[in-house]
Amino acid sequence: MLVASILQASTGYGFSILATPFLLLFFEPMEAIQINLILSLFISIVMIGKVKVDVDQKVLKRLIIGSIFGLPIGMVIFLWLPLNWLKLGIGILILVLTVLMIAQLKMKQTRNRDYGAGGLSGTLTTSIGMPGPPLLLYFSGTKTNMEILRGTTIAFYLYIYVISLAIQMVVAGTTQTVWLASLVGAPVVLIGIFLGQLLFKVMSQKFFSIISYFILLFTGLYLCINQLIL
């Protein structure tokens, strides 16, 4: 959780991607996803005041509109599709797209692609608790400035985590374990936010890109290996 929150505070990504696999070792899938949502929301609330000047409001609105269509789709997937199939498919897709990004594949940012990225992010949030990969792949391909990338995604998370958590609690329910674990994790996350802010101040755009690729490769490999082995 400490490493994941450092990455989240310094890049705008990383908490759900790194924390969820480890949470799944100790909790049921529903509990792991909800703990991730609560702590990720906590990070966004703490950080929004620091990054709001870097938020691209037009892109943010398009991401939110797109996510409105993706959120219910993700919840249906969570309830009806075997989670191992979903994770394997997403893992393979992330690996292929990440290799293309490392190979310097570029894409042009458009209004419709903003909507699409938001929709995919919403779908992954309610299905497996990972909204980051679609946005990270998209913004990496469009070579978005790291300040704008971090600010816009954290602002987007503030919205999507609230909605996703509410949907999860209404449809799947919640447990006392979820809230106790989140309460225990909050102080560790606060330390991670502080350290992540320090890291961001000394981070170059190139190093930012390297971390982004690492996060994506880790996610893709974890999702694939976890399902193929287990």
Image (spheres, rainbow, N blue to C red):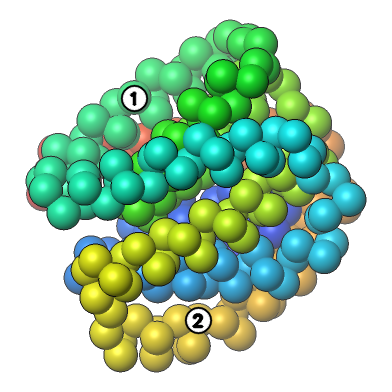
- The crowd level at tag 2 (other Cα within 10 Å; few <14, some 14-19, many 20+) is some
Q: Nearer the viewer, residue 138 or 11?
A: 138
Q: Specify whether 163 is left or right of 61.
A: left
Q: Quadrant of residue 146?
A: top right
Q: Quadrant of residue 88?
A: top left
Residue 16 in percent (x, y) is at 46, 56
Residue 31 in percent (x, y) is at 28, 72
Residue 185: which numbered mark, if any?
Answer: 2
Residue at horizontal 56 percent and vertical 19 percent from the top: 112
Q: Specify whether 149 is left or right of 33.
A: right
- Residue of label 1: 93
**Number of numbered tags placed on the structure image:** 2
C-alpha span from label 1 to label 2: 31 Å
Q: Up-down: is 97 above or below 39?
A: above
Q: Is residue 1 visible?
A: no
- The crowd level at tag 1 (other Cα within 10 Å; few <14, some 14-19, many 20+) is few
Q: Amino acid at mark 2?
A: Gly
Circle 1 sits in a helix, a strand or a loop, which is it?
helix
Q: Going from the N terminus, do you reach mark 1 or mark 2 first?
A: 1
Residue 29 in percent (x, y) is at 23, 64
Q: Specify whether 163 is left or right of 167.
A: right
Residue at horizontal 21 percent and vertical 45 percent from the top: 77
Residue 218 in percent (x, y) is at 43, 41
Circle 2 sits in a helix, a strand or a loop, which is it?
helix
Q: Up-down: is 105 above or below 120?
A: above
Residue at horizontal 31 percent and vertical 33 percent from the top: 91
Q: Up-down: is 14 above or below 91?
A: below
Q: Amino acid at mark 1?
A: Leu
